[in-house]
Structures are given as structure tokens and as C-alpha cells.
Image: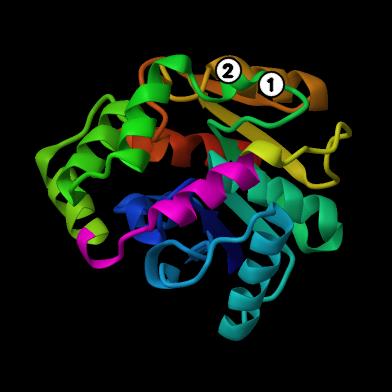
Amino acid sequence: MTDWIFLRGLVREQRHWGGFVREFESRVPDAKVHTIDLPGNGVLNTLRSPLTLLEMVNACRSQLQQQGVVPPFRFVSVSMGSMVAVQWAHAYPDEVAAMVLINTSMRPFNRIYQRLRPANYIPILKLLVAGATALQWEQAILKMTSHHPGEPVLESWTHLREHFPVSRWNALRQLWAAARFRAPTRKPCAKVLVLVSEQDQLVSADCSQAIARRWDVPIKVHPSAGHDLTLDDGPWVAQQVLLWVDS
């Protein structure tokens, strides 16, 4: 079996992968998926979110060690989760064999208005400052991240937020860590595949394009999905990974 580590992004948790885990394991031969939470999210929502991505990496390494999962690892990661994967490959290069980076952005490759599209500034600020119900939070997040959300998804994600809420302070700490992270300009030693949604309304697709050009790694573009690419078209993501692994 081949161990794949799945990492979600800002204020998201492992259960937000939904049915994509089964989809991935059914399509990618010998894949064994391990989903873990960043501190402050999901089952770790009572913990304080670290202010640096290296601290997040070390927390994730501890989780995998406790579960008996040993390197080398292969990552499928979304948004801030991809920043964590890149930091992991930079800090512990012998532990990372491959990375699939989905709809991410990083300094020094991308500008701030590309990393978070300006149309989202006020909605996010309202959520963080004015406060909102679990339903309002998830409605806003789905509007920013998905082009194909269904009512069952909204109900499920609202339930998760009600029972495993991410505090406003932890959300701000995660934003700070992501904003301050600076990726190495040289390509990581691991194999890298970049996947990007052309219609991403949260993060500009130009961010992933710039990273792929700078590191000279393959990139595949989905024409219609939103930021949460595995939600909008999980089968497409799994197929791209399968083709990449086979190549």
C-alpha cells in the first residue's frame, strides 16, 4: 500500500473531504489515504492554531507518528494545506515523495490580491468581526469556494461547524500563518503536480500557474470548478493523479 496524506485548508477539517477519500482510493491503485487535522480545526478545534506553518508541520508529523504511519509520504492538499505540504518538503525533504497541490498560493510567487481575490475581503471580514451562525458561515464559504454545492453538503458542513467550531482567533492565526509563509524559490525534491480551477473565485488561478512555471512542474486546469476542486469534481482530480502516477 502507498500512504497518501490529505491536508485541507484554512478553517477546514478532514471530514470536509467527504466522498473524495473513497473516490481516490477506488481509482488510484494501492492508495491508502490518511486524513488529519491542523491544530485548531476539526477534532483538534480546542487547540491553539500555530502562527507558523513549520509548527503545523510538526503537529501533523506527531499525529502520523502516533498512528504508526511512516514516511515517505505523498500528499494531496488544498489551498493552505498545500503550503503545509511544501513547508514539510522543505523542512524534511526525505519524508516527502510526492505532492499534489490544489488551488494554492504562496509568497514570493503571488501578489496579495491574487492570493485572496478582493471581492472576498468584506464577506470574510464580516464573518470574523461581526460574527455569524454556523449556517451563515458555511453558506458564505460554499459561495466563495464551490460552483456546484448541494443542500446535503450545506447541511453536513453546518453540522460540523456546530459541533467542531473553529474560533475566530484560530481563524485569524491561520490567516496570519498562511500570509507570512514564504516558499523556497527552488523546486522541492519531491515530485509535484499542480491542479487548478480556472474559475476559482477565492484564489486567482494565476497563482498556481506562476508556481508551476517557476518550479517547472506539470499543471492541469479544470475549466469550471471552484476553489474546492475535490468537492466540485472529485473524479477529475483522482483521474489526474492516476495519470500522473502512471507517467
Which residue, as the protein is rendered here, is positioned at the far front? 130
The answer to whether residue 106 is above or below residue 131 is: above
Residue 247 visible somewhere in the drawing: no
Residue at the image position 64 percent from the left and 37 percent from the top: 179
221 inside magenta stretch: no
Residue at the image position 41 percent from the left and 67 percent from the top: 45
The answer to whether residue 81 is above or below residue 126 is: below
Residue 6, numbered label = none
Residue type, label 1:
Asn
Which residue, as the protein is rendered here, is positioned at the far right? 186
Residue at the image position 62 percent from the left and 31 percent from the top: 194
Secondary structure of the residue carrying numbered label 1? loop
What range is drawn magenta here? 162-178
The residue that label 2 is drawn on is 114
The residue that label 1 is drawn on is 110
Question: In what quadrant of the picture does the C terminus appear?
Answer: top right
Residue type, label 2:
Gln
Image position, residue 103 (x, y; %): 53, 31
Q: Residues within 10 Å of mark 1 (few under 14, many from 20)?
A: some
The answer to whether residue 234 is above or below residue 68 is: above
175 inside magenta stretch: yes
Q: Residues within 10 Å of mark 2 (few under 14, many from 20)?
A: some
In the image, 189: left or right of 52?
right
Between 18 and 52, the one lying in front of the other is 52
Residue at the image position 81 percent from the left and 27 percent from the top: 215
